[in-house]
Amino acid sequence: MTNEQYPSGAALLLGTILKRRGHEVKVLNSIGDRLDLKDIIKIVEEFKPQVIGITVSTYQIKQTLHISIRVKRLFPSTLIVIGGAHVSAIGGSILEKFFDVDIAVLGEGEEALVKIVEEEPLKSINNIVYRNKGEIIETKRSSSPIELDTLPFPDLSLVNLNRFSGPYPVKKTPSMFIMASRGCPFNCTFCCKPIYGNTVRFHSPEYVIELVEYLNKKHNIKEVYFQDDTFNLNRRWAVTIVEGLLKKNLNKKMTFRASSRVNENLVDLEWLNLLKKSNFWLLYYGVESGDPEMLIRIQKGITVEEVKRAFSLTRQAGIKTESSFILGLPGETIDTIKASINLWKEIKPFAGGFSRAVPFPGTQMEIEVRSKGYIKYSKYEDYTMKETMVRTEALTYEELENWAKYCERLMYWEALERSLLDPGLLLRSIRSLGKTGVYSKIRSLLGKKEVV
């Protein structure tokens, strides 16, 4: 069983909204709560919910199908609702796959789910697909997104945070993430963003600062991860938040990490020094490739020089870095992979590394690999993170998988060396072995570091 870093933010927020409106709510995280299908059915039998909502990613299709089939067979009067990134990407045809699901919510689900639970007429609810006497009906898409500052703070009593590891490498626990904004204006060809789209909306800085303080005081959260697509996109907004954390002295009680971009106009020492002062200890940068032409082809909107500059300045400011590279994107060759490995070695990120390319539904990448027949599994329910699913003009599935395994070994050896050189990190990692899956990763390090 794999680890789960955080509870589902969507399920937690929706559960909080319904609870505040007086409904009895139970939030389950199948991985974090270590629940199999029998466990879930037993809980449904005991709790007797009128509505079951399931957040669906592409990797969760099989599980959702199994749950919906069993629940509907055993409890036919229970309303089953699905939502999430995969559901929104597929759109109105989604119920043709999920025969036992009653309603699919497309896009943001806060307002739609409340209306469904409180039994408003389905035809009057925007952004849903539902069954009516055997016919699948899709309602109109709302053009007015929810006002973010009207959303409640998450009620963490709905989950057991002790069951979640937080993102490796561990700094402080318990850890929780925040989405201080929604949306991303960039157009990476591999990115699937059917819920929030290209328009970026921001919580007010006051809301975000108060949320962080609430998490610390109410739930004893010691670390917050600003998991926005790009926390440093709006400089004035981000600076106001970070300075607010300082004024509240939250930097003395908590640590912070954030997702950022490397673009030269978004990263400089003044910004990084402010983050360091506010106890931001790690920044995640999406790099994806070390080859200049590949960065252009995937429309990443960055250059190799900007990557090197950002990592150098971040290290200069005393903040650790996390990187992401993707293997197997269209156009990948042995030379572009070697360029990525060489860049990874040069920028020396503290964490992160290489992942396999995944053709998520609706992405430009998916359209390209499907049109060329370069995809291993045609059905979404066969998708997996554990093996290569695409090939390129130059590299077969097997060749890309060999490179992926080689890069994994590089990452794991680096992680082990980091832990051995940092007693504090090693101790924190040992304490979280049962939650993070580190033990299974360490066992995989026994393989040799041969060069492909």
Image: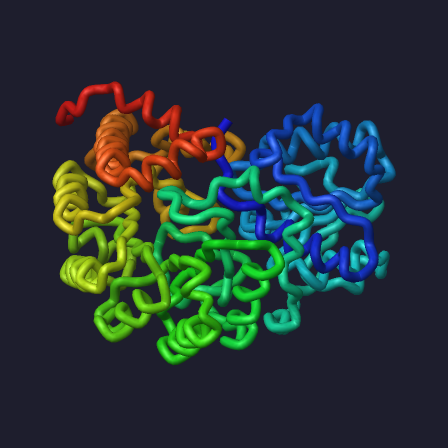
Q: Position of residue 226 (x, y in %)?
A: 44, 60
Which quadrant of the rendered structure holds the C terminus? Answer: top left
Q: Position of residue 338 (x, y in %)?
A: 14, 40
Quadrant of res 233: bottom left
Please give left or right for residue 424 compared with residue 125 in the image: left
The answer to whether 268 is drawn above or below residue 311 in the figure is below
Q: Is residue 353 visible?
A: yes
Residue at left offset 64%, top offset 26%: 36
Residue 306 higher or lower than 357, as above or below: below
Left or right of residue 23, residue 435 in this image: left
Whether residue 303 can be seen here: no
Q: Quadrant of residue 408?
A: top left
Between 38 and 391, which is closer to the camera in this rendering?
Answer: 38
Q: Residue at x 61, y 73 (%)?
A: 149
| Horizontal and vertical percent position of residue 183 | 47, 65
Front residue (pair 241, 46): 241
Q: Nearer the viewer, residue 81 or 442?
A: 442
Q: Residue, x 53% and y 32% (percent of image)? A: 381
